[in-house]
Image (spheres, rainbow, N blue to C red):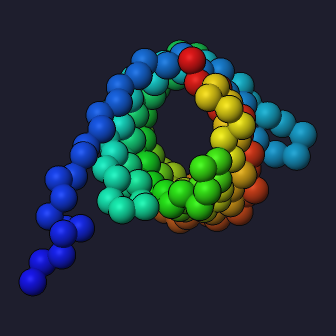
Amino acid sequence: MISKTVLRPLKTIFWAAFILTISSVFVSAANFEYYFSINPQLKVSKKINHFNISSRNRLEYHIDDKLWKYRNMLKIQYKLKEIISIWTGDEIRYSFKKYQFFENEFLAGCTIIINKSFSSDIFYDLRQIRNKNSWERAPVLRTSLNINF
């Protein structure tokens, strides 16, 4: 017998955005790089019981370097309370200039909803970056403040 939970229709949410970002990237202890990018993106998500599974596809155009990159983030989120959820995900990055995947990030953290417009993420990022023929690992503890309009 198939349970009623499985037979419920699955709702799929599509979300698209066109974003201009100013980002800083940690290069070394004394050096941050800043870049401007345009990020058209499409996000598809499904809620199954208490879990939200999403896939965000982003094309990234770096204005300064004239580079195109593709990013995909697969994320699974579980809501603990009304304002707190935990999540894990994996993001891959592809360079159209080098014709190869050049970065992969395993992510795990929590989101705290402050109000309708603000939320904050605290998360662990195990970043793997391709240098020539090998991959280098960099563990990073990250935070973000998210503003929704």
**49 or 15, nearer to the observer:** 49
**63 or 90, nearer to the observer:** 90
**70 or 77, nearer to the observer:** 77
> Residue 41: percent from the left, percent from the top?
38, 29
> Residue 57: percent from the left, percent from the top?
36, 38
Q: Is residue 70 left or right of residue 132?
A: left
Q: Is residue 27 left or right of residue 70?
A: right
Tell me where residue 131 sits by quadrant: bottom right
Q: Residue furthest right?
A: 30
Q: Residue furthest left?
A: 1
**31 or 115, nearer to the observer:** 115
> Residue 112: percent from the left, percent from the top?
68, 47
Residue at x 31% of width, y 50% of height: 46
Numbered marks: total: 0
Q: Residue furthest bottom?
A: 1
Please, is residue 31 above or below residue 21 in the view? Answer: below
Q: Is residue 65 left or right of residue 142?
A: left
Whether residue 25 is visible, yes or no, is no
Residue at x 24% of width, y 67% of height: 5
Whether residue 118 is visible, yes or no, is yes
Q: Is residue 20 left or right of residue 11?
A: right
Please, is residue 146 above or below residue 131 in the view? Answer: above
